[in-house]
Amino acid sequence: MNEYTYPIIAGITVGTALRVFMLRTDYRQYPTYLHGKIIHLSLGFIAASLGTIAIPSIMEKEFTAVTFLTLAASQFREVRNMERNTLTEMDSFELVPRGNTYIEGIAVAFESRNYLVIFTSFVVTLCYLAINGWAAVGAALVCFIISSLLMSGSKLSDIVTVELSELSFEGAGLYVDNIYIMNIGLPERQDEILKYGMGFILTPKSFSVRSTIANLGQRQAILHDVSVTLGVFRDSGTPALVPLIKRDLNDGRIGVFILPQEKDPVRAKEIISSVPVLENAIQMPSRKRNREG
Amino acid sequence: MKMEKAILAAITTQSEKVTGSTAVFHCDTKEEMEAVAANLEAILDGIAHALSDRLYIIVKH
C-alpha cells in the first residue's frame, strides 16, 4: 500500500464501471453472447488501468511511461478490426444484412468507448490525487454524463418525417406511394407482398439530409433494424421477398418497403424513427455552400 | 469482371420474341407460364420479373 493505491483503485473501478454502463445489449442484439461481453469488459479494464497509471507515472517523473498510451491506441484500433471482422463474418448469414456502413459505425463505437474509459480513469485519478476523493466522485459523475451524451447519436426522426404509405402494383411494378421499388412477376408473390408488406415514405426535413438518407449503408441499416425488431417474412430461397428502399430522384424522399412478420404499423414507424443516423452516412452539402457564399 | 445480375432463363408464350443463348421455356398458356416461372424462381434462387404479360425472365441479383 502506498499513496497511489486508493487513487489507482478508484480510477480503475470507475473506468471499468463506465465500460459496463456503455455495454448494453439492445435491440441491435450485439453483443449478445457472454464471451463477447467478457472480451469488452477485459479490454475496458485494461483501458481503465492504462488511463489510471498515467497520472502516478507523471507524478513520479516517469515520463516515458506515458508512451504506453500510444500502445493503447494501437491496441484499441485492433478492437475495431476485431469487431469489424466478426460482424462482417456474421453479416453474410443474416436474412437482412447490416451492411458495411452500419458495421463500421458499430466498430468505431467500440473503439471510441475504450478511449472514453481511458479519459475517465485519467481524470478520476487526477482529481483524486490533486484534490481529494470527493472530487474524484464528482469527476466520475461528470464523465458518466459526458459519455452518455457522446454515445447517443441522432436518430432518424431528427432528420426525416416518417409516414405510412400504401403499397400498390402497376402491372408488375411494385410502388410505395409513387416510388418504384421493383418488378415482381408472379401473381402469387404479388399477393404475398400486398398481404405481408408495408410501405413507408421518409421525407427529408432539410436539403443536407437528402444525401444522408440516400446513402446505401443508411438505407440498409433501416431495413436491418426493422427486420431484427419485427421479424422478416422471407427465407434463403425467396429472393423476391426482399425488403428494399428506393429513392425518389425528384425530391429526395425515400420509399421503404418492408416485409415484417408482425404487421404493426405503429411499432414499425417507431422503429424506423429511432434508427440511428450513421455517422459515416452524414453529409453536409449545405455547409460547404454557406462557406463559399 | 464480376457479373452482378444475369438472366438465368426466359419463360414465354410468345416464342418468336426470345432468341439467343438464354435458356428459353416455351409455354402454351399464361397459367403454365406462371407455374414454370414459380418453379424456376425457387430452383434458381432468382426473381421472376414480368417484362410483359407473355414474357417472364428469371434474374439472379
Image (cartoon, helix red, strand yellow):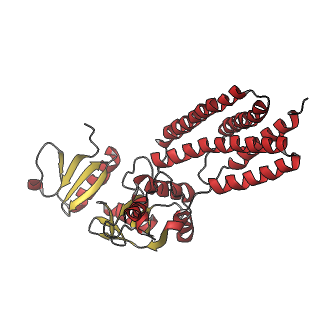
| Residue A112: image location, x then y, percent | 61, 44
Residue at left offset 33%, top offset 72%:
A178
| Residue A127: image location, x then y, percent | 81, 45
| Residue A285: image location, x then y, percent | 39, 61
**A163 relative to A152, above or below:** below
Number of numbered discs overlaid on the protein picture: 0
Q: Can residue A263 be seen in this view?
A: no
Image quarter for residue A173?
bottom left
Decide which of A111, A39 is in the foreground and name it.
A111
Image quarter for residue A129?
top right
Decide which of A74, A99 is in the foreground and name it.
A74
Q: Is residue A125 visible?
A: yes
**A192 relative to B8, above or below:** below
Image quarter for residue A273?
bottom right
Residue at left offset 45%, top offset 50%:
A235
| Residue A110: image location, x then y, percent | 60, 43
The answer to whether A134 appears left or right of B42 in the picture is right
Quadrant into which the N terminus of chain A falls = top right
Residue at left offset 78%, top offset 44%:
A124
**A204 relative to A31, above or below:** below
The answer to whether A166 appears left or right of A41 in the picture is left
Quadrant into which the C terminus of chain A falls = bottom left
In the displayed image of the protein, which residue is found farthest to the right? A1
In the displayed image of the protein, which residue is found farthest to the front? A61
The answer to whether B12 appears left or right of A285 in the picture is left
The answer to whether A111 appears left or right of A123 in the picture is left
